[in-house]
């Protein structure tokens, strides 16, 4: 995966589901399977950038690693740790009505550009020095590093939010301000919050960690 041009969100979700199915076949337990997948991604993120770049087919590496973890657990007693409750969402940010109205207008322009897949409109609403950060929480193979600059941000946003099969992108309240929610079959698969200065988006935070998305499920 390149950092500026991430694989599509659909590929990330399909990859995670594939790994879960492997572990489920081995253990028959969703809790155990989730533990195996989380450990698989933990090992992926312990690699340095050069090691990850040297893996020609990440999905094959992840599959082998998940299989190895399953075998390790099957041949030794183990305890699957309890699943911690996701951290509560931060409290809404309070600001003056005029600031919130401006944020809402810019965020909705950003959402409209994402919804239509209009690359030119997307770049136009991004500040030249914009940044995008994604949070997979070790639960999906999300980009490791932030992307900087309007063009790089537009490419990552396009890969993660635009044109995903069977998904619906909508603008809505994210921590008290207008943001974006991407859902597939009623389940949130990505949530994006944005920072705004004047008439431009200066920063985008995309949450991909399934544990942090449950609040936005329908």
Image (cartoon, rainbow, N blue to C red):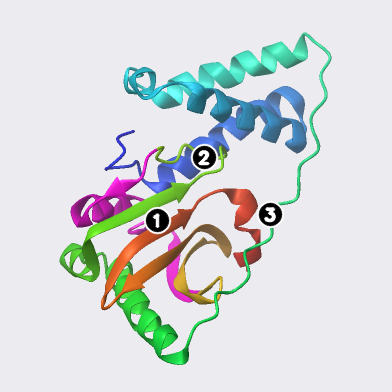
The residue shown at (51%, 23%) is 46
Q: Is residue 114 above or below residue 161?
A: below
Is 128 left, or right, of 181 in this rendering?
left
Q: Does the CB distance between marks 3 and 1 fall below 8 Å? A: no
Q: Position of residue 138 (x, y in %)?
A: 56, 37
Q: Secondary structure at mark 2?
A: loop
Q: Earlier in the sequence, mark 1 or mark 2?
A: 2
Residue that badge 2 annotates: 140
| Residue 58, numbered label | none
- Counting labels gives 3
Q: Does the CB distance between marks 2 and 3 fall below 8 Å? A: no
For the record, the magenta segment spans 145-172
Q: Kindly indicate the quadrant of the structure image that contains residue 131.
A: bottom left
Q: Position of residue 193 (x, y in %)?
A: 45, 65
Q: Secondary structure at mark 1?
A: loop
Q: Earlier in the sequence, mark 3 or mark 1?
A: 3
On whether residue 156 falls in the magenta region, the answer is: yes
Work out how far the residue at label 2 is from the one at label 3, CA to CA, in angstroms: 18 Å
Residue that badge 1 annotates: 165
Q: Secondary structure at mark 3?
A: loop
Q: Nearer the viewer, mark 3 or mark 1?
A: 3
Q: Nearer the viewer, mark 1 or mark 2?
A: 2
On whether residue 52 falls in the magenta region, the answer is: no
| Residue 87, numbered label | 3
The residue shown at (76%, 41%) is 83
Work out how far the residue at label 1 is from the one at label 2, CA to CA, in angstroms: 18 Å
Work out how far the residue at label 3 is from the one at label 1, CA to CA, in angstroms: 29 Å
Density class for disc 1 (Cα within 10 Å; few <14, some 14-19, many ≥20) is: few
């Amino acid at each position: 995966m390149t950092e500026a041009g991430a694989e599509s969100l659909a590929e990330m979700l399909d990859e995670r589901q594939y790994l879960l199915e492997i572990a489920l076949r081995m253990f028959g337990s969703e809790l155990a399977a989730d533990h195996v997948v989380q450990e698989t991604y933990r090992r992926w993120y312990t690699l340095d950038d050069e090691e990850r770049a040297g893996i020609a087919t990440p999905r094959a590496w992840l599959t082998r690693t998940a299989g190895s973890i399953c075998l390790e657990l099957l041949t030794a007693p183990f305890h699957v740790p309890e699943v911690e409750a996701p951290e509560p969402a931060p409290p809404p940010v309070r600001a003056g009505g005029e600031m919130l109205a401006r944020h809402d207008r810019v965020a909705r322009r950003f959402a409209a550009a994402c919804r239509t897949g209009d690359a030119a409109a997307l770049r136009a609403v991004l500040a030249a020095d914009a940044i995008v950060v994604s949070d997979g929480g070790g639960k999906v193979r999300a980009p490791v590093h932030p992307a900087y600059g309007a063009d790089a941000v537009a490419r990552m946003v396009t890969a993660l939010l635009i044109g995903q099969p069977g998904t619906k992108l909508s603008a809505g309240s994210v921590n008290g301000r207008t943001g974006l929610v991407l859902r597939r079959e009623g389940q949130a698969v990505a949530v994006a919050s944005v920072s705004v200065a004047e008439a431009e988006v200066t920063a985008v935070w995309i949450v991909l960690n399934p544990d942090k998305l449950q609040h936005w499920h329908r």
